[in-house]
Image (tube, rainbow, N blue to C red):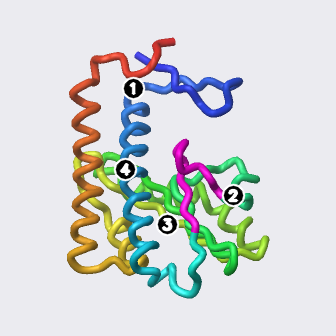
Amino acid sequence: MSFVLDMRDKSETQVLPRDAIVVVVVVVVVVVVVVEVVVVVMVVLRKGLLDGCDDWEVSADLPEWDKHPEVIRRTTLRPDIVIYSPSTQQVITVESTVPYESRMEQAHTYKKEKYLDLTKELEESGYRAKIMPIEIGARGFAGSSAYDLLSKLSISGNKRTKALKLLAETAENSSRWIWCRRNEQLLHKE
């Protein structure tokens, strides 16, 4: 059974299998949580990767947060989260994935390779660019990449533990919610 996922470009409708839709929905929920964590860090800490300037902007591939800088909008790629400093021309892209735990390493490699060209393009245009894919397993296991991201944003100790727990619980609860509703019509049938 397949469902139609309404894409941004209305001229192109993509048919996705149910498993892909589950992953898309879980990823969106995790992106929202990651955006909230990043915003808190930016407001409170301004350390680690964020050291050296005070004009950081955050955007996400969500309707209410979709204010990606021009340097990103001119490409076809839309990272989940973009942290951008106009004054220092730094771009940090965070790409989250909620794979099965057995596929976390492959998911990390895939996302890193997917955005490698964007990173190179940004660097060739004079930007300092960093891609940070993170994985939170569908059953709530926070991968080492999530730990690394929080560490590089200077979230440590108890705050990092709480943030990782929030990310893991969000992914697990979202997966459970989707599983419990797997027989309901989530999107329009084709």
Q: Which amino acid lies under the numbered mark 1 shown in the image of this protein? A: Arg
Q: Nearer the viewer, residue 142 or 177?
A: 177
Q: Image point 41% across, 50% down: which residue?
A: 32
Q: Image point 44% across, 73% down: which residue?
A: 43
Outermost residue toward the right in this view: 125
Q: Is residue 58 shown in magenta?
A: yes
The label on residue 18 is 1
Q: Within 10 angstroms of label 2, few (less than 14), some, or many (20 or more) residues?
A: some
Question: Which callout, 3 or 4, points to the residue nearer the camera?
Answer: 4
Residue picked out by circle 2: 72
Q: Earlier in the sequence, mark 3 or mark 4?
A: 4
Q: Within 10 angstroms of label 4, few (less than 14), some, or many (20 or more) residues?
A: many
Residue contact at pointers 2 and 4, CB within 8 angstroms: no
* Location of residue 70 in the rendering, given as x and y in whole percent from the top left corner: 73, 58
Q: Image point 23% across, 43% down: which residue?
A: 173
Question: Which callout, 2 or 1, points to the residue nearer the camera?
Answer: 2
Q: Earlier in the sequence, mark 4 or mark 1?
A: 1
Which residues make up the magenta segment?
A: 57-68
Q: Which amino acid lies under the numbered mark 3 shown in the image of this protein? A: Met
- Label 3 – label 1 distance at C-alpha: 27 Å
The label on residue 30 is 4
Residue picked out by circle 3: 132
In the rendered structure, the answer to whether residue 139 lies left or right of residue 47 reads: left
- Label 3 – label 4 distance at C-alpha: 15 Å
Q: Secondary structure at mark 2?
A: helix
Q: Image point 55% across, 42% down: which residue?
A: 63
- Label 2 – label 1 distance at C-alpha: 30 Å
